[in-house]
């Protein structure tokens, strides 16, 4: 992770909380912002691939990457609303995903034989 992600995200959260408060509505808004940004990333991808024949190609890979960064930032801000330790929570989740990936990459190849109880 970028070394500046969490300090900058914390500053953004502080500024948003000062401007908009910290109630349930604001928490919902942070979550909805993630969805909005994901939609913009999807729209940029559609524009990059030219899937809208009327508009043709309107975006580049860099545009999609830029929108994905906005998704990451919005998600980082939203995560602050659900835990007091966003870096630790993300770190744990990231490591869990890596462990699952490793398990898929190296499946257990041993053949399990049924025990007497299981075969009855």
Image (cartoon, rainbow, N blue to C red):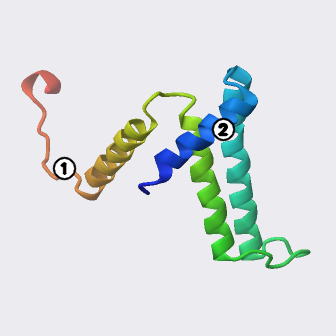
In the image, residue 9 lies at what x, y percent?
A: 55, 45
In the image, residue 18 lies at what x, y percent?
A: 69, 30
* Residue 43: numbered disc: none
Q: Quadrant of residue 102?
A: bottom left
In the image, residue 59 lies at what x, y percent?
A: 75, 74
**Cα gap from disc 1 to disc 2, whole angstroms:** 49 Å
Q: Is residue 95 left or right of residue 3?
A: left
In the image, residue 65 lies at what x, y percent?
A: 61, 67
Image point (15%, 27%), residue name: 119
Q: Quadrant of residue 22?
A: top right
Q: Is residue 102 left or right of residue 87?
A: left
Q: Sort mark 1 into few (<14), some (14-19) or many (20+) by Cα contacts within 10 Å.
A: few
Image point (69%, 59%), residue name: 41
Q: Is residue 21 left or right of residue 78?
A: right
Residue located beneath label 1 in the image: 108
Against 49, residue 42 (above or below) is above
Q: Quadrant of the C terminus?
A: top left
Residue located beneath label 2 in the image: 15
């Amino acid at each position: 992770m970028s070394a500046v992600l969490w300090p900058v995200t914390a500053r953004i959260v502080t500024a948003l909380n000062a401007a908009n408060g910290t109630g349930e509505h604001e928490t919902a808004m942070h979550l909805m912002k993630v969805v909005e940004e994901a939609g913009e990333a999807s729209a940029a991808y559609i524009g990059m691939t030219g899937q809208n024949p009327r508009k043709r190609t309107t975006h580049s890979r860099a545009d999609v990457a830029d929108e994905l960064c906005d998704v990451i930032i919005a998600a980082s801000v939203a995560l602050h609303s659900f835990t007091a330790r966003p870096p630790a929570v993300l770190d744990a989740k990231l490591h869990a995903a890596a462990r699952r990936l490793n398990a898929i990459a190296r499946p257990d190849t041993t053949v399990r034989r049924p025990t007497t109880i299981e075969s009855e």
